[in-house]
Image: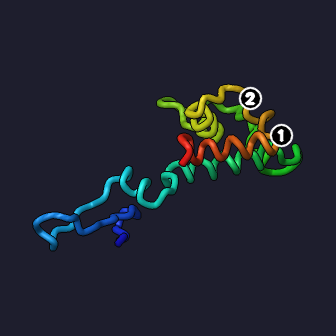
Amino acid sequence: MCLGNKGGLRKCILKPFGKDINEWRRRKNVELRTLYNKPFITNIIKSKIIQWAGHVARADPTSNIKRVLNLQYDKPRPVGRPRNTWEKGVKNILDDIGMYQDWQNIAQDRQEWKRLVGEVKDPGGL
């Protein structure tokens, strides 16, 4: 049985086979993955980000999403830690699976990009 909590996370509980039948416990993520045979939710979210990045990379150069992606600022950045950009997040996700090449050129090939999205979604394979 799964219950939602205030933080938006799932709390899945079960009755363990033991001495006390009325005792409930939380299941670990590894247990849930083996029980339901589904990829982790974080990997699904990352795959959706990569999927959208492919749409942006294949967009027409005059479209607004492509113009925003290639936007350059003339003003100096504020003092402090540099802000993470959406594109840096995409590169970090792709670095996790070992793809260090230019992602915008690879995204032009839909079949290869679809394979990468699947690899991000389920890196180990179910």
The residue singled out by tag 2 in the image is 102
The residue singled out by tag 1 in the image is 108
Which is more toward the observer, 59 or 14? 14
Q: Quadrant of the N terminus?
A: bottom left
Packing grade of label 2 (10 A; few <14, some 14-19, many >=20) is few
Image height of 16 relative to 79, above or below = below
Query: Farthest top residue?
Result: 100
**Which image quadrant is residue 31 in?**
bottom left
Residue 88 lies, in percent from the top left, at 61, 35
**Is residue 48 in sight in this rendering?**
yes
The amino acid type, in three-letter code, at marker 2 is Asp
Q: Is residue 5 left or right of residue 104?
A: left
Residue at position x 51%, y 52% in the image: 39
Which is more toward the observer, 36 or 117? 36
Which is more toward the observer, 10 or 14? 14
**Is residue 67 in sight in this rendering?**
no
The count of marks equals: 2
